[in-house]
Image: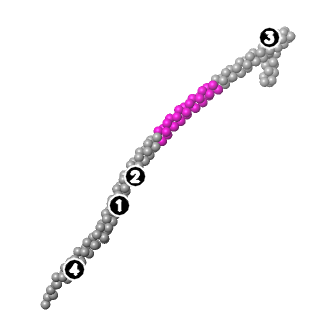
Amino acid sequence: MLLQPEIPTMLFSLLAFLFLMFFMSRFFLKPVLQLMEKRKNYIQKQLQEAEETNKKALMILDEQKELLLKAKEEAKNIIQQAKVEKGKEAEKIIADAKNKAEEILERSLKEIQMEKMKALNSLKKEVGNIAVLLASKLLKHNLDREKQAKILQNYFQELGKAE
């Protein structure tokens, strides 16, 4: 035999179920849904912030790359400029050294010329003195040509030994 449901028990069960549903939805379901909505909003906000932070980081990275490229270019220009200046300075130093060498050479040539002139003047005086001495000896002896030649020869030999 089949059991037959009793209507008052069914109604009571239905009313209890509806009351429980109302009570649960009012006090438990709404706060849980609100909590889940808040959590969902928080997560979405965090994702948006993370995305914005990522975009900012990428922009900063691009700026840093540009700054690095500019710095490398500037360093390259500075190095190039230093090389040019170094080359100019080296050329100037070489030119100065050549000028100084030419000045020293000219001064040396002048000094050599002056010493040569002094030596020639001294030699002329010495030759003049020798000629006078020789003439005086020749006049003292008043000799013929053969004796004069012998006296000159002896004198030149003495002069050669003195040197």
Tell me the mark number nearer the camera, choosing from 2 and 1: 1
Q: Tell me if mark 4 has few (under 14), some (14-19) or many (20+) residues whose alpha carbon lies within 10 angstroms of its own.
A: few
Label 1 to label 3, Cα distance in Å?
A: 142 Å
Which x, y percent locates residue 21?
25, 73
Which x, y percent locates residue 113?
68, 20
**SS of the residue under disc 2:** helix
Residue pictured at 83% horizontal, 11% vertical: 136
**SS of the residue under disc 1:** helix
The residue segment tinted magenta is 75-104
Q: Indicate which disc residue 13 carries.
A: 4
Residue receiving disc 1: 42
Q: Indicate which disc residue 57 carries.
A: 2
Q: Earlier in the sequence, mark 1 or mark 4?
A: 4
Q: Earlier in the sequence, mark 3 or mark 2?
A: 2
Residue pictured at 34% horizontal, 56% vertical: 48
Residue pictured at 81% horizontal, 12% vertical: 132
Asked if residue 52 is among those painted magenta in the image, a careful observer would answer: no
